[in-house]
């Protein structure tokens, strides 16, 4: 599914992957499509089951992280959704949530040196304003996880900012709360990943206000928002294979694409390989199987 339609509900936002519908004054319906974006460009080809995997994995994490503070999650069970969203093509990929006033910051936590963090470290010897020990290698575990926020851009690229810049944007007290909540969620996610033979290298969270409470929103610890490595294939000094969309990024980077629209066409083996990585991440993290777009015990 590249686009959704929920009859009788007003679509109030179409993002790169998710579409948001108004249920009432207090609740929203989030529908995750099978769209894939890389380098902030949306591809024309869907990744089968991707939206359902993102939804069901987020629901798993929202339940697991519930003790760390409020979230916007209400239910992903078909019986709890608005009647118009109980169609077979929408169930599994639809989530009922509380409305929140979003804080326009991406709350990134890094436990390992990878991606843009590795590039910044090689250039400056620090990441996101954090001074790090000299001599670290690619994919090396950091002495402790670090909070490296960025701006939240509706169009174009997010921009990395320091914790000081975040405090100037949202206030020192809220910046501290965002950092504490993000680090706690990362720690819980990393512990669960480690128990399943995976490494949570880095991830990003979003937060918003609900009835005066700071709440975790959007998606949580999915292959779209996180970098998962297999412990069995982890090797210091190189970028390990990952269960996320890095497979697509690597393919298009090697194709000579200039990272501007339109996105290149993905061959069938890249689409299938990406789906397999998302399914594997879901199955490893939750301990449940995935059959035909449905989770199964």
Image: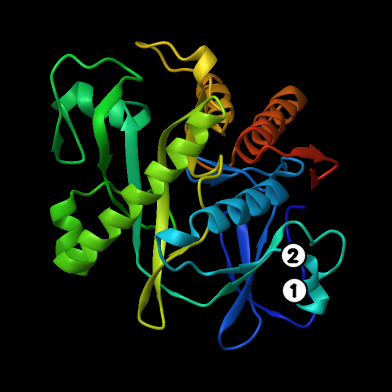
User: Which mark, by number, is residue 77?
Assistant: 2
Question: Which residue, as the protein is rendered here, is positioned at the far bottom?
Answer: 25
Q: Are marks 2 and 1 in contact (CB under 8 Å)?
A: yes
Direction from residue 107 to residue 286 in the image, left or right:
right
Q: Is residue 205 above or below residue 193?
A: below
Task: Tell me which colouring the rendered structure shows.
Answer: rainbow
Direction from residue 74 to residue 295 in the image, left or right:
right
| Position of residue 107 measured from the top left corner of the image (x, y, whole percent) | 34, 52
- For image coordinates 75% across by 44% down, the residue present is 49
Name the residue nearer the viewer: 294 or 64.
64
Does dot 2 land on a helix, a strand or a loop? loop
- For image coordinates 77% across by 52% down, the residue present is 1
Direction from residue 196 to residue 203 in the image, left or right:
left
- For image coordinates 29% across by 31% down, the residue present is 117
Q: Residues within 10 Å of mark 1 (few under 14, many from 20)?
A: few
Name the residue nearer the viewer: 16 or 235.
235
Q: Residues within 10 Å of mark 2 (few under 14, many from 20)?
A: some
Q: Is residue 258 above or below residue 47?
A: above
Name the residue nearer the viewer: 119 or 228.
228
Across the whole image, how many numbered discs are drawn on residues? 2
Give residue 29's quadrant in the image. bottom right
User: Which mark, by number, is residue 1?
Assistant: none
Question: Which image quarter holds the C terminus?
Answer: top right
Direction from residue 218 to residue 295 in the image, left or right:
right
| Position of residue 102 measured from the top left corner of the image (x, y, whole percent) | 41, 70
Q: Is residue 152 visible?
A: yes
- For image coordinates 53% across by 19% down, the residue present is 241
Disc 2/disc 1 C-alpha distance (Å):
6 Å
Q: Which residue is mark 1?
A: 80
Q: Is residue 219 above or below residue 278?
A: below
Does dot 1 land on a helix, a strand or a loop? helix
């Amino acid at each position: 599914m590249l686009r959704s339609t929920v009859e009788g509900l007003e679509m109030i936002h179409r993002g790169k992957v998710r579409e948001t519908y108004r249920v009432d004054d207090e609740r929203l319906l989030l529908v995750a499509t099978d769209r894939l974006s890389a380098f902030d460009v949306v591809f024309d080809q869907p990744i089968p089951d991707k939206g359902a995997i993102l939804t069901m994995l987020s629901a798993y994490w929202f339940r697991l992280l519930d003790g760390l503070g409020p979230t916007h999650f209400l239910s992903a069970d078909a019986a709890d959704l608005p009647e118009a969203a109980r169609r077979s093509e929408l169930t599994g990929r639809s989530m009922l949530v509380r409305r929140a006033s979003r804080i326009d910051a991406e709350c990134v936590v890094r436990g390992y040196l990878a991606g843009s963090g590795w590039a910044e470290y090689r250039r400056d010897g620090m990441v996101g304003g954090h001074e790090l020990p000299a001599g670290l290698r690619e994919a090396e575990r950091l002495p402790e996880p670090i909070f490296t926020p960025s701006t939240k851009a509706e169009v174009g690229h997010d921009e990395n900012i320091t914790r000081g810049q975040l405090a100037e944007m949202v206030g020192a007290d809220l910046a501290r709360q965002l950092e504490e909540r993000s680090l706690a969620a990362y720690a819980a996610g990393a512990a669960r990943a480690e128990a399943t033979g995976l490494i949570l290298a880095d991830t990003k969270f979003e937060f918003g206000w609900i009835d005066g409470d700071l709440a975790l929103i959007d998606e949580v610890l999915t292959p779209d928002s996180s970098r998962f490595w297999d412990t069995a294939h982890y090797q210091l000094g190189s970028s390990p294979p990952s269960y996320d969309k890095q497979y697509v990024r690597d393919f298009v980077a090697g194709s000579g694409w200039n990272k501007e629209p339109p996105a290149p066409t993905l061959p069938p083996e890249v689409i299938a390989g990406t789906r397999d990585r998302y399914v594997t991440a879901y199955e490893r993290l939750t301990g449940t199987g995935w059959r035909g777009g449905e989770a199964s015990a």
